[in-house]
C-alpha cells in the first residue's frame, strides 16, 4: 500500500468515524493514536479532497432565505428572520412574527441581560409562545411610559411583565405617562430620583425588542392607544413622519430631530436605541414596508423579524428609491 493510499484510507476512516459513527474528535484521537489537532486537520483535508461532501437540505422556500440574505447584506443586519405566512390577515401575520420573536429570544438571552421592550399588538403576543422551564437571571423593562387607560395589554409595562413571567425573570415598571404636554413638565418628572435611576438603565440595555409603527392617518394601533387622534396622525404624516420606534417619530431617512413630539416622550431616545448592542425589530404586513425601511436606513436595528411579502416590498422600495 503506497503512501497516497494510506493517506486516503486515513482520511476516509477518520471521516466515517466522525460523520457516520458520531464519534467526537477526542475519541477518534484515542482510537487512532493521533493528536486531536491532527484529527481536525484530517477532517478538513477530507472535505478539501471531496471525500466529505456536505449538502444542506432546506425545507424552507428558497425565496425566504434569499430575502434574509438580501436584507442582511443591504442593511448590515446581524440577522434577518423572514417568515412565510400564507394569509395576508394582519392578525395571522402578527401571530407568526410573535412566535419567531419568542424563539429568537429563547436562543439569545443569557444571564445578566437587561432587556427593554416597547409596546404594540405584535409584541403583546410574544409571551404566549415562550417555552421556558428554567429561571433566568435577566430583567425586562419598558422603554417608555404608559399609554393612558386604553388597551392596557399593549403597553410596554404590561409586555415587560408578561415576558418576565414566562422567562421566570425580573421586571421593573415605569410609572409615568409616555408623553406629556410640554417639555418643562417632562423635565420636572425626570428630575425625580426614582425616575433618574430608571432612565439610567436605558444606557445599559443589552437587548431591546421593538415594534415598528406606521403613523399613517388611519393607523389602528396608534389610534387604539388612546393617545393619538386622527388629526394628530394627519399632522405627523403631513410633516413627513414615516415610522415610529418606541413612539419616537422618524422620517423616511430615519431622522427624528425635526419632530417636536419626540422631545415630550417619557422614555428612551433615538440615540440610545442606536447604542443598544442587540435591537430586535418585530414588524410585518406590506403596509408597514416604508416604516420598516425608514427604521433600517436610520440604523436602529440589528435584527429584523418580518414576513416574506413585507421583506420583498422593503427590498423593492429600497431599490426603487436608491437605484440599486
Image: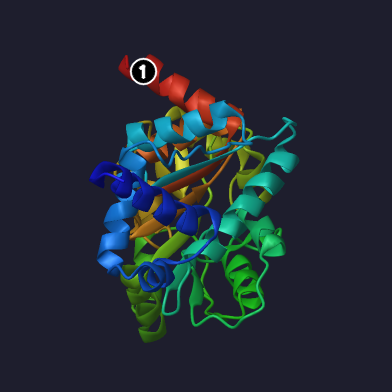
Residue under the image location 27 percent in, 69 percent down: 35
Instruction: Name the image quarter holding the C terminus.
Output: top left
Q: Which residue is mark 1?
A: 321
Is 302 located above or below residue 322 in the figure? below
Is residue 299 among the parts visible in the rendering? no
Is 130 located above or below residue 1 in the figure? below
Is residue 150 among the parts visible in the rendering? yes
Relative to 218, 276 lies left or right? left
Residue 206 image point, x, y percent:
38, 67
Is 189 located above or below residue 209 in the figure? below
Observer-nearest of 94 and 26:
26
- Name the colour scheme: rainbow
Relative to 2, 294 lies left or right? right
Observer-nearest of 70 and 28:
28
Residue under the image location 51 percent in, 33 percent down: 65
Is 91 located above or below residue 209 in the figure? above
Observer-nearest of 56 and 182:
56
Residue 218 image point, x, y percent:
64, 33
Observer-nearest of 33 and 160:
33
Q: Residues within 10 Å of mark 1 (few under 14, many from 20)?
A: few
In this view, the residue farthest toward the front is 1
Residue 238 appears in which quarter of the rendering?
top left
Q: Callout 1: helix, strand or loop?
A: helix
Residue 213 image point, x, y percent:
53, 43
Residue 62 appears in which quarter of the rendering?
top right
Label total for image: 1
Relative to 133, 201 lies left or right? left
Residue 152 image point, x, y percent:
69, 64
Amino acid at each position: 500500500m503506497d503512501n497516497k493510499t494510506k493517506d486516503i484510507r486515513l482520511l476516509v476512516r477518520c471521516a466515517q468515524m466522525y460523520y457516520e459513527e458520531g464519534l467526537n474528535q477526542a475519541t477518534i484521537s484515542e482510537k487512532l493514536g493521533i493528536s486531536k489537532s491532527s484529527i481536525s486537520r484530517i477532517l478538513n483535508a477530507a472535505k478539501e479532497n471531496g471525500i466529505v461532501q456536505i449538502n444542506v437540505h432546506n425545507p424552507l422556500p428558497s425565496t425566504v432565505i434569499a430575502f434574509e440574505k438580501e436584507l442582511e447584506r443591504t442593511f448590515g443586519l446581524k440577522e434577518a428572520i423572514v417568515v412565510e405566512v400564507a394569509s395576508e390577515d394582519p392578525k395571522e401575520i402578527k401571530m407568526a412574527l410573535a412566535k419567531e420573536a419568542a424563539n429568537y429570544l429563547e436562543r439569545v438571552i443569557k444571564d445578566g441581560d437587561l432587556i427593554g421592550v416597547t409596546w404594540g399588538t405584535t409584541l403583546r403576543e410574544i409571551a404566549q409562545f415562550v417555552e421556558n422551564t428554567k429561571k433566568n437571571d435577566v430583567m425586562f423593562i419598558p422603554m417608555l411610559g404608559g399609554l393612558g387607560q386604553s388597551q392596557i395589554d399593549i403597553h410596554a409595562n404590561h409586555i415587560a411583565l408578561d415576558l418576565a413571567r414566562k422567562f421566570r425573570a425580573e421586571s421593573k415598571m415605569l410609572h409615568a405617562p409616555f408623553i406629556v404636554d410640554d417639555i418643562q413638565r417632562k423635565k420636572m418628572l425626570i428630575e425625580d430620583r426614582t425616575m433618574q435611576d430608571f432612565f439610567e438603565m436605558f444606557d445599559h440595555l443589552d437587548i431591546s425588542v421593538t415594534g415598528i409603527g406606521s403613523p399613517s392617518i388611519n393607523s389602528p394601533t396608534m389610534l387604539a392607544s388612546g393617545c393619538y387622534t386622527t388629526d394628530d396622525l394627519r399632522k405627523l404624516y403631513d410633516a413627513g413622519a414615516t415610522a415610529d420606534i418606541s413612539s419616537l417619530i422618524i422620517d423616511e431617512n430615519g431622522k427624528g430631530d425635526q419632530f417636536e413630539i419626540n422631545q415630550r416622550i417619557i422614555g428612551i431616545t433615538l440615540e440610545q436605541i442606536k447604542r443598544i448592542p442587540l435591537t430586535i425589530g418585530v414588524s410585518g404586513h406590506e403596509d408597514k414596508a416604508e416604516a420598516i425601511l425608514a427604521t433600517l436606513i436610520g440604523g436602529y436595528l440589528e435584527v429584523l423579524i418580518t414576513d416574506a411579502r413585507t421583506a420583498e416590498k422593503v427590498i423593492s422600495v429600497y431599490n426603487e428609491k436608491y437605484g440599486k
